[in-house]
C-alpha cells in the first residue's frame, strides 16, 4: 500500500509495534547486524556445500537457523561467496531431470465482497464499539486501490462478529476441507491421473488447527489410498506453500513413478478480530480465504524444480506473527515489515541465483507472494524487477487479497497461464511469519 496517507497512518500507533529504539535505519533490530564474536578476521562466515541440487549456504550464528542462505545476508549487502564448481541450472539443462509440478488447482469460497462492501459491514457492526479514529483509519485502508475484492468462507458475513471458538473451529473445518478438496480435484484432473496414483499428500495451514488433520478429510473425500503417506504442516504462515512443495519433492523421490499432492489452504476469516489496533485494522482489509493444490511427478510437461532455499530470522518474529489473546489468534504486523521483507527476500533470491550461475536479469517469470502493496513494492525494488515481472502478484492481490500461503501458488498459476516457453527459468518466492522466506527456482519443461 503506497499512498502517503496510508504511510502516515501506519506510523500512528507505534505502541503496538516493536519500539524504534530496537531498530536501525532499515527498521530492523540492530543486534541482527552483529557478527559472530568468534569469527576470525577475513572469514567469509559461510560455505557452499556441493553435490546436491539443494546445496545450501550455511553460517553458524546464534538464534539463526538457515538453509540455502547465510545469516550474514542481513548484516551486509556485500555477499561474495566462493564460486561454485557446480552450476545447477547448467546441470539440469544437460540431461539431468528433476521432479516437476505438472498441474495446479485453486479454489476460493463463492461469497465475495468488494472492499467498500466489506468496510460498510465492519462499520455497521463496530460503530460505537471501537474508537471513531479506528473507523476513520479503516475507511482509508479499505479504500486503497490495490485490492478490489476478497472471498470469505461464510454464507453470512455477520457470523464473523462475536463468533464463539467452537463455531469458529467448525467453520474453519468446513471451508478448509471444502476448498482443499476443490483445489485438489482440479489439480488431479489437470494432471490426468487417478486418485490411486497419489502416494503422498501434504497439507499446510496456519489459520486453524484440527486433529486429525485436514489431510485425513481430503483422503476420505477424494478416495485416496488408505495407506497413503499424509502430513499436516502448521505454523509456516504465508510462506507455507514452498516448504510443503519441498517436502513433496522429497516424498516423490522415495516412490518413483507415483504422484504427490501438495495442498495449501487458509481460512483467514477464521482468525478475524477487531479492535483499536492498527495490526487488526490492516489485517481486516488485507486477508482473504483460498486454497491451492499442486501435483508433483517425476516426468511429463511442467515446471522442473531445480533449487530451493529458505532462511529463518527469528529476530523479526514480532514483526509478523500471530499472538494469542484470550485464547484466540490475533494477527500482528509492524510498520517495518515491508523493508524487512524486501531485504530478506532480496538476499535470499540473489544467493539462489548466484549459485546457479544466474542473475535477476536472467529470470523473466516471477511468482511472488501477494503480501500487500508495500511489501510487493519493497521486494520489487530490492530485486530490481519490472512492473511486468510482478504483474501476477499484483493481480492476485487485487482479485483475492492476501490469502496467506496459497497466494504464491495463485500467482504461479497466473504466470503459467501467461505463457512460459520451454527451457525458460522462473522463480517462486514466498515469505511470512517468523520471519521466514523461501525461494524455489524452476524451469519450464
Image (spheres, helix red, strand yellow):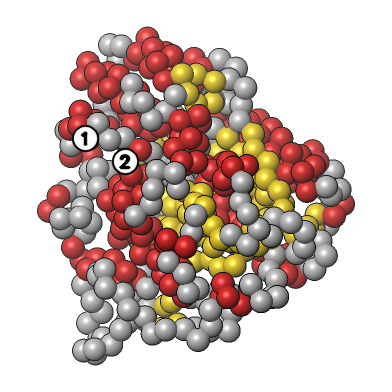
User: Is 109 rendered above or below residue 100?
Assistant: above
Choose between 222 and 105: the one closer to the eye.
105
The quadrant of the rendering that contains the N terminus is top left
Residue 331 visible at all:
no
On screen, residue 251 versus residue 209, left or right, reads right
Quadrant location of residue 71?
bottom left
Q: Which residue lies furthest to the left in this view?
A: 21
Q: What element carries label 1?
A: helix
Residue at the spot 50% in from the left edge and 86% down from the top edge = 85
Mark 2 closeness class: few <14, some 14–19, many ≥20 residues within 10 Å: some
Q: Which mark is residue 374?
A: 2
Regarding mark 2 in the picture, which secondary structure is present there?
helix
* Occupied quadrant, residue 421: bottom right
Counting every numbered tag in the picture gives 2
Quadrant (top left, top right, bottom left, bottom right) of the C terminus: bottom right
Residue beneath the point at 15% across and 55% down = 25
Q: Indicate left or right for 411 with 219 as reference.
A: left
Residue 83, percent across and down? 42, 84
Residue beneath label 1, please? 7
Residue 323 against residue 290 in the figure, above or below: below
Between 71 and 325, the one nearer to me in the picture: 71
Asked if the residue at tag 1 contacts the one at tag 2, i.e. Cβ–Cβ closer than 8 Å, the answer is yes
The numbered mark, 2 or 1, whose residue comes first in the sequence reads 1
Q: How crowded is the residue under tag 1: few (<14 C-alpha within 10 Å), some, or many (20+)?
A: few
User: Could you say where residue 202 lies in the image, as x and y percent from the top left?
Assistant: 67, 53
Q: Which residue lies at the image location 53% right of the left edge and 83% below the top edge? A: 86
* Foreground of the two, 2 or 281: 2
The answer to whether any part of residue 92 appears in the image is yes
Report, in whole angstroms, how far the alpha carbon at label 2 lies from the one at label 1: 9 Å
Amino acid at each position: 500500500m503506497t499512498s502517503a496517507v496510508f504511510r502516515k497512518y501506519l506510523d500512528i500507533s507505534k505502541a503496538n509495534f516493536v519500539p524504534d529504539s530496537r531498530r536501525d535505519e532499515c527498521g530492523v533490530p540492530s543486534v541482527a547486524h552483529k557478527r559472530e564474536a568468534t569469527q576470525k578476521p577475513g572469514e567469509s562466515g559461510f560455505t557452499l556445500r556441493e553435490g546436491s541440487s539443494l546445496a545450501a549456504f550455511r553460517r553458524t550464528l546464534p538464534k539463526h537457523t538457515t538453509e540455502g542462505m547465510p545469516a550474514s545476508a542481513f548484516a551486509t549487502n556485500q555477499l561474495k561467496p566462493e564460486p561454485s564448481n557446480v552450476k545447477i541450472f547448467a546441470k539440469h539443462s544437460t540431461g539431468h531431470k528433476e521432479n516437476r509440478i505438472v498441474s495446479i488447482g485453486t479454489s476460493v469460497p463463492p461469497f465475495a465482497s468488494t472492499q467498500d462492501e466489506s468496510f460498510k459491514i465492519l462499520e455497521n457492526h463496530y460503530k460505537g464499539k471501537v474508537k471513531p479514529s479506528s473507523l476513520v483509519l479503516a475507511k482509508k485502508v479499505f479504500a486503497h486501490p490495490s485490492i478490489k475484492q476478497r472471498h470469505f468462507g461464510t454464507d453470512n458475513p455477520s457470523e464473523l462478529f462475536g463468533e464463539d471458538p467452537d463455531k469458529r473451529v467448525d467453520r474453519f473445518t468446513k471451508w478448509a476441507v471444502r476448498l482443499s478438496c476443490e483445489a485438489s480435484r482440479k489439480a488431479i484432473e489437470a494432471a490426468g491421473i487417478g486418485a490411486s496414483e497419489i502416494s503422498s499428500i501434504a497439507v499446510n495451514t496456519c489459520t486453524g488447527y484440527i486433529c486429525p488433520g485436514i489431510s485425513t478429510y481430503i483422503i476420505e473425500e477424494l478416495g485416496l489410498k488408505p495407506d497413503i503417506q499424509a502430513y499436516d504442516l502448521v505454523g509456516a504462515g504465508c510462506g507455507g506453500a514452498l516448504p510443503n512443495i519441498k517436502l513433496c519433492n522429497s516424498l516423490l523421490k522415495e516412490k518413483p513413478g507415483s504422484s504427490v499432492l501438495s495442498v495449501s489452504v487458509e481460512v483467514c476469516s477464521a482468525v478475524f478480530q477487531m479492535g483499536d489496533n492498527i495490526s487488526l485494522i490492516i489485517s481486516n482489509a488485507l486477508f482473504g480465504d483460498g486454497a491451492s493444490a499442486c501435483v508433483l511427478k517425476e516426468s511429463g510437461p511442467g515446471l522442473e524444480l531445480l533449487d530451493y532455499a529458505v532462511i529463518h530470522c527469528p529476530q523479526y518474529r514480532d514483526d509478523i506473527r500471530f499472538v494469542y489473546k484470550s485464547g484466540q489468534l490475533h494477527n500482528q504486523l509492524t510498520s517495518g515489515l515491508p523493508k524487512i521483507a524486501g531485504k530478506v527476500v532480496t538476499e535470499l533470491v540473489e544467493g539462489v541465483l548466484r549459485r546457479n550461475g544466474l542473475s535477476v536479469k536472467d529470470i523473466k517469470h516471477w511468482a511472488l507472494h501477494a503480501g500487500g502493496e508495500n511489501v510487493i513494492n519493497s521486494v520489487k525494488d530490492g530485486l530490481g524487477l519490472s512492473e511486468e515481472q510482478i504483474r501476477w502478484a499484483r493481480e492476485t492481490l487485487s482479485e483475492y487479497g492476501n490469502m496467506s500461503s496459497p497466494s504464491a501458488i495463485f500467482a504461479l498459476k497466473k504466470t503459467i497461464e501467461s505463457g512460459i516457453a520451454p527451457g525458460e527459468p522462473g522463480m517462486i518466492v514466498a515469505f511470512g511469519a517468523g520471519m521466514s522466506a523461501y525461494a524455489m527456482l524452476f524451469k519450464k519443461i
